[in-house]
Amino acid sequence: MSNLPNCPKCSSEYTYEDGTLFVCPECAHEWTAESEAESREDEKVIKDSNGNVLNDGDTVTVIKDLKVKGSSSVIKIGTKVKNIRLVDGDHDIDCKIDGFGAMKLKSEFVKKV
């Protein structure tokens, strides 16, 4: 019995090969082995300042004082930020900080708690 990959769309284990394509009989999704490898490479991994992988919903701590653009206030070192959301772009963390509101942070200035 050969080891075929599970369906990337519905995670079904009942996939089969049809020529150069893999086919899922449950959701009718078709894909190639090359597209599966490309999708793994496209996933961007966001890491904190210590190299820990960050995920949506994590709690992080600010590792240095950060100036807030357009304001004279500062986010102090050690500020906990709960329930972060990862986004694409230069500032890759979207969050809400108590006393400041919605903010975008760079992952290089936080560490995972």
Image: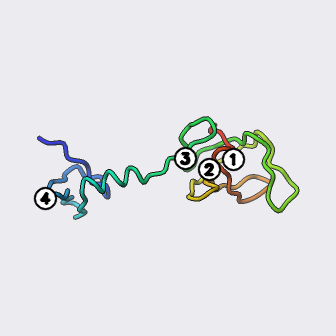
**Tag count in the figure?**
4
Task: Residue 56: give x, y in percent of width and height.
Answer: 55, 50
- Secondary structure beneath label 4: strand
- How many angstroms separate mark 3 from mark 1 (CA)? 16 Å
Disc 1 target residue: 81
Q: Earlier in the sequence, mark 3 or mark 4?
A: 4
Label 4 crowd (10 A; few <14 / some 14-19 / many >=20): few
Residue shown at the point (63%, 39%) measured from the top left: 49
- Secondary structure beneath label 1: strand
**Looking at the rendering, in which quadrant would you find the N terminus?**
top left
Q: Earlier in the sequence, mark 1 or mark 4?
A: 4
- How many angstroms separate mark 4 from mark 2 (CA)? 43 Å
- Secondary structure beneath label 2: loop
Residue 69 position (above or below residue 46) = below
Disc 2 target residue: 83
Label 3 crowd (10 A; few <14 / some 14-19 / many >=20): some
**Which residue type carries mark 1?**
Val
Disc 4 target residue: 18
Q: Earlier in the sequence, mark 4 or mark 2?
A: 4
**Which residue type carries mark 3?**
Ile
In the rendered structure, the answer to whether residue 1 lies left or right of residue 69 reads left
Which of labels 3 and 2 is toward the front? Answer: 3
Residue shown at the point (75%, 59%) measured from the top left: 101
Is there CB contact under 8 Å for labels 3 and 4? no
**Which residue type carries mark 4?**
Asp
Label 1 crowd (10 A; few <14 / some 14-19 / many >=20): some
